[in-house]
Amino acid sequence: MKNSRKKLAVKIIAVILAVVLIAVGLFGGYLLYRFSCNKSNTTNSYDAVYEAEQVKLSTDSNGIFKVLKINDTHFFDGVCENDKHTLDDLKAILDKTPCDLIVVDGDLVDGFNLKTTYDKFGAINLFANLIEEYNIPWTFAPGNNDFEIDGSNEDIIAFMMQYEHFVFGNKKNVDGSMQFMIDVYNNDKLVHSIAVMDSGARKPKAIGPYQPISENQANWLNDEVNSRGVKTSVFFHMPTTAFQTAYDDGEAYDGFDMYNTYPYDEIKNDDVFDNVIKDNNNITLISCAHQHSNNMCSFYNNRYYQLSSVSGYSAGRNDFIYPSCTLTVINTLDDNVQTMYSFEQIRA
């Protein structure tokens, strides 16, 4: 009798283990599929990014150039309540905010999301169609969440290439999926440049440590800025260690909300970029995002460090944060770095 009970118990345990192993295997296989699949449904080749023409834009007659930054929208499908609220706000902001360039500064879409209703590229399409209505050049600096599931950053960029006003570029043998310069002219004279960069993500996807901007990216930026010899504004998603120093020791920009909800230097060992570019006096603005409930703009070491809180309602944030976009106005003819910029948070 006892042996029969033991055999029955062993069988039950074996069945339970088999079911668990099958479930784990199926779930693991599903994860592998989701991490590797491309749902962009585009025929564009990412390789075209390496052959993109140099982007050249112009100031107004007074040398003014305006950049509107949208970041951390974390779109889920483009049609859920939060996403519709975000799109409505963005339309209201764009309707009242003339600008010369729109920078989508990372985490446009949600990251690791296994819900069957998650529609990454459907959301990107709705967002891009809204932006296209304004006939304004726009670009994308990849965030740490954009690539995590249902397509890589390269897939996103290839998908975005279908839109008329999307500008892009990259250089082979430099880390990251988006690195390029935008040259800004006044009366046929180069007066400013804008760098758009990929600041990396977690490795492995979604669960590993953050991978900071690499030395070859920082060297690429230094070389591009030095070859132009004009003041340069840099946009990427995740802040570097210098943002904490700028927050603590810099001069706060008057009228810009300053929040220190999370440490600005939370990405460890992320000082390679700062060390490479610290003495480059032509890098006059570094503009980031990523930390949803942080917000700052400080002048430090003869440049501005500016970080924007979220632009979308699907992004996690503290209750005191209201989604907004950041307008950066550059007086490209002003030689004084501290006065050549003005910053404003724009709400719907």
Image (tube, rainbow, N blue to C red):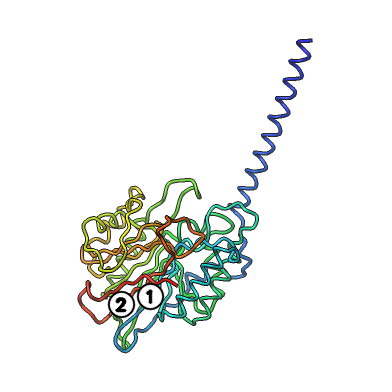
Packing grade of label 2 (10 A; few <14, some 14-19, many >=20) is many
Disc count in the image?
2
Q: Amino acid at mark 2?
A: Ile
Distance from Cα at disc 2 to Cα at disc 1: 8 Å
Expressed as whole percent of the image width and height from the top left, the position of residue 96 reads: 43, 80
Q: Amino acid at mark 1?
A: Val
Query: What residue lies at 46% left-to-right and 46% top-to-bottom?
Result: 208
Expressed as whole percent of the image width and height from the top left, the position of residue 177 reads: 46, 62
Residue 189 located left or right of residue 49: left
The quadrant in which residue 243 appears is bottom left
Where the C terminus falls, by quadrant? bottom left
Please identify the residue farthest to the front as the structure is shown. Answer: 320
Where the N terminus falls, by quadrant? top right
Q: Are marks 2 and 1 in contact (CB under 8 Å)?
A: yes
Query: What residue lies at 32% left-to-right and 88% top-to-bottom?
Result: 188
348 or 54: nearer the eye? 348
Packing grade of label 1 (10 A; few <14, some 14-19, many >=20) is some
Which residue position is annotated with label 1?
Answer: 67
332 or 133: nearer the eye? 133
Secondary structure of the residue carrying numbered label 1: strand
Query: What residue lies at 26% left-to-right and 58% top-to-bottom?
Result: 247
Query: What residue lies at 50% left-to-right and 78% top-to-bottom?
Result: 165
Expressed as whole percent of the image width and height from the top left, the position of residue 92 reads: 48, 76
Of mark 2 and mark 1, the one earlier in the sequence is: 1
348 or 222: nearer the eye? 348
The quadrant in which residue 283 appears is bottom left
Q: Is residue 10 visible?
A: yes
With respect to residue 142, does 18 lie above or below? Answer: above
Could you say which disc has been placed on residue 330 in the image?
2
